[in-house]
Amino acid sequence: MSKQSKKNNSKKVPLKNIPQSPRGSFFGNFLISILVLFFVISIYSLLIDNNEKEKISISELAGSIMNGEVKKISVKSGDIEATFVDDLIKISKKEENISLAETLAAYGVTPEQLNKVEVNINQEGGFLYWLINLSPILFPILFIAVFIWFMAKQVKGAGMQAFSFGQSRARLTNPDDQKQKVTFKDVAGCKEAKEELSEIVDFLKNPKKFFEIGARIPKGIILMGAPGTGKTLLARAVAGEAEVSFFSISGSEFVEMFVGVGASRVRDLFQVAKKAAPAIIFMDEIDAVGRVRGGGLGGGNDEREQTLNQILVEMDGFEPNEKVVVMAATNRPDVLDPALLRPGRFDRRVTIDLPDRSDREEILKIHAKEKPFAEDVNLTIIAERTPGFSGADLYSLMNEGAILAARENHKKISQFDLIRSIEKVMLGPERRSHILSKKEKEIAAYHEAGHALVASILPYADPVHKISIISRGKAAGYTLKLPFEDRKLQSKNEFLDDIAMSLGGYVTEKLVFGDLTTGPSNDLQVSTALARDMVTKYGMSDTLGPVALESSEGKALFGRGVNEREYSEKVGSSIDEEVSKIMTEAQSKAEKIITEHRTILDVIAKRLIETESIERDEFESILITNGISPKKKEETV
């Protein structure tokens, strides 16, 4: 929840070596063979090179000796190498079975003339002699043998790849690797979750005391929570605290096109983990294979179901003394198969909530390490302005703040950089190139001023922190409102005021300009969905009463959510009437506020047109100047 696990750059150690591509290996080996051939040819050429010495006949050599032009002769079998007085070397040939003296005597060289020349007779033999003579035969044979060896190795590698297809793709983090080690100190917040998981740490460190008293530690722990809350990081922290091997794999890595591969990988993973016990097996995004079976998709040979069945079998096969704990993470626990969650499998469920204000401050402090900050930085204010942010969001916030400071060539990160990074994480980067015309800018200013004014007047709406008509993401402008404190529950009055605030821009455009634009489209979608949830999920309709007519999650079909209606057409008509009634009343409430405070609306809009952004302090001063008291923390309901 503090260090974002998916951004951890720690080096993963694979359980098995992943085979290389057969095609790439073939061409690599073929290229090596060609290079070896050229190398052999080059060596052979050097060995038999004659340095391109001049060749002469034996008669010419005899004439030179008689004329006293030769000072040295070297004889190797039938080859004669003569060194002349001017140090020029010439080559000649003779018959191998006849001596040099007999050969030269036949051409008129007397013994006295031959005695004036230094003669060396070299008897050839040894390894180099035979190597040179046999090289024309040996080197081609050697090259063919090496080439066949490379091809055989390639075929063997392809066969091994086929056999390793069903092996686990899990990544191993060794307990001795200090660079990858994560402990509970690196995880801020999650106090209850860490208390639950500390029992697992104690079991892995000292299982004997549990067995002696007859206790059995849960075989499986499933971590549930919103994306970015730190589920993977907590699992790594458990392994780091217990100092055991950590095998991590994603649920999607089990599933392949071929039936049975996923089940084979599950068997291999559990087998390797048992050999490395004590150990932790962590399956991230287990809902990829753990969804409810029997959905009618894929038939009886559905690969996902085969994989899930194998996981269930392996978990049943665990013995208490194996000291292997299975942990899994998901943000969709509602779609998991009941067999996974029954006692004896994933029977301990740890819910990880979004961090509250104090937890967010602790997370920010962890991410602030090794970052230079200016004197004006106050992480408490940043934590107050980030309700609903997850640990991953806070990591991104701090990183974006550092990027903004570096982009502007600042040596330290200021509070202004962090404030801007909050809006960037929430809404996206500024689009200053998205230039509005004068008329569009006026419409956008009145639209956002309408939101801000309605939110300031309504008693149950959250206070406004900033108004801007600078485009961010898909929004042409935005009104940032944040609660004073984190909320776990929301009341009906808060919902109604929130809907009226969302319609503030719609009402303002209609009253001020007598026309409507596409600007309020998102406001209408959000407010209508909230009104429908009030009627169908929260029982906040006086007409329909305390009845939940729609579940929180729809059924999945072909990757899309499908909500199955569980009520009659008459009830459906009543729901539409109630939603329309809520929206109409919210519109009337917003119209009344805009009409009564039109002067303040004009002031806010004109200020927005001039400055493009209004911060909280300036906005509250405008309200006080016009006789409206801004909301204070103690006045919130």
Image (cartoon, rainbow, N blue to C red):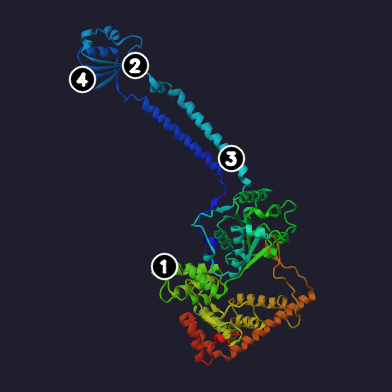
Residue type pointed to by label 1: Ala
Disc 1/disc 3 C-alpha distance (Å): 49 Å
The disc, 4 or 1, on the residue closer to the chain's N-terminal end is 4
Q: Does the rendering let one see residue 287?
A: no
Residue drawn where x is 48% and y is 57% of the image: 179
Residue type, mark 3 in image: Ala
Disc 2 and disc 3: Cα gap in Å?
53 Å
Residue at 19% of width from left, 14% of height from top? 68
Q: Which mark identifies residue 158?
A: 3
Q: Which of marks 2 and 4 is in front?
A: 2
Q: Name the residue under label 2.
A: 123
Q: Where is residue 257 in the image (x, y as percent from the top left)?
A: 66, 50
- What is the secondary structure assignment of the residue under circle 4? loop
Q: What residue type is labelled 4?
A: Val
> Could you say where residue 554 lies in the image, as x and y percent from the top left?
71, 67
Q: In this view, does 30 lie above or below 337?
A: above
CB of mark 2 within 8 Å of CB of mark 4? Answer: no
Identify the element where label 2 is drawn: loop
Q: How far apart are marks 2 and 4 (CA)?
A: 25 Å
Q: Do the residues labelled 4 and 3 touch (CB within 8 Å)?
A: no
Are there few (<14), some (14-19), or many (20+) residues within 10 Å of tag 3?
Answer: some
Mark 4 to mark 1 CA distance (whole Å): 80 Å
Is the C terminus in the top left, top right, bottom left or bottom right quadrant? Answer: bottom right
Q: Which of marks 4 and 3 is in front?
A: 3
Q: Mark 1 points at which residue?
A: 406
